[in-house]
Image: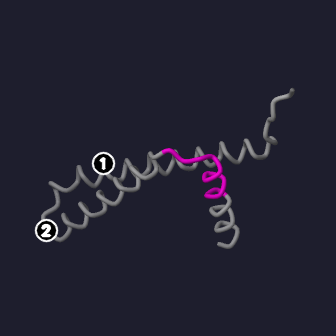
Amino acid sequence: MSAYLPPTRDIRERLDTAQLLSRFHHGERALALACGRFIPFVRRLEEKAELARTAWEAVLAVARMSEPVQTADLHRIWQRWRAAQARA
């Protein structure tokens, strides 16, 4: 009995998707930390609220990206992203 190995293209697409999600994860995390660190130095209350809202949304995005995702879901996400890039 031979083990099934997915085609090389599928493996590359999965790795690309994982790398893309990792970049988004680290970018959103950096955004949340930067907003949080900058809040004490802003004078206007409205600007502080906007920074806090942006940081909160980034934290929610990071939390969502940290959840386990099935490989098939990653593949579908990657395909949608590639299609969107092709249209742009």
Q: Quadrant of the N terminus?
A: top right
The kind of residue tagged 1 is Leu
Q: Find numbered disc 2 in the image and state the secondary structure of the residue it sits on.
A: helix
Determine which quarter of the picture holds residue 76: bottom right
Dot 2 amino acid type:
Leu
What is the span of residues highlighted in magenta in the rendered image? 68-78
Of residue 64 and residue 1, the one placed in the foreground of this image is 1
- Locate residue 49: give its quadrant: bottom left
Asked if the stretch drawn in magenta spans residue 6, the answer is: no
Above-or-below relation of 36 to 54: above
Farthest top residue?
A: 1
Depth check: 44 or 12 in front?
A: 12
What is the quadrant of the C terminus in the image? bottom right
- Up-down: is 61 above or below 10? below
The residue singled out by tag 1 in the image is 33
Provide the residue designation for mark 2: 45
| Near-viewer residue (74 or 35) | 74
Rate crowding at label 2 as few (under 14), some (14 to 19) or many (20 or more) other CA atoms within 10 Å.
Answer: few
Please rate how many residues cluster around mark 1, counting C-alpha atoms within 10 Å: few if below 14, some from 14 to 19, many from 20. some
- Residue 52: percent from left, percent from top: 23, 60
Sequence-first tag of 1 and 2: 1
Q: Position of residue 75 (x, y in %)?
A: 66, 53
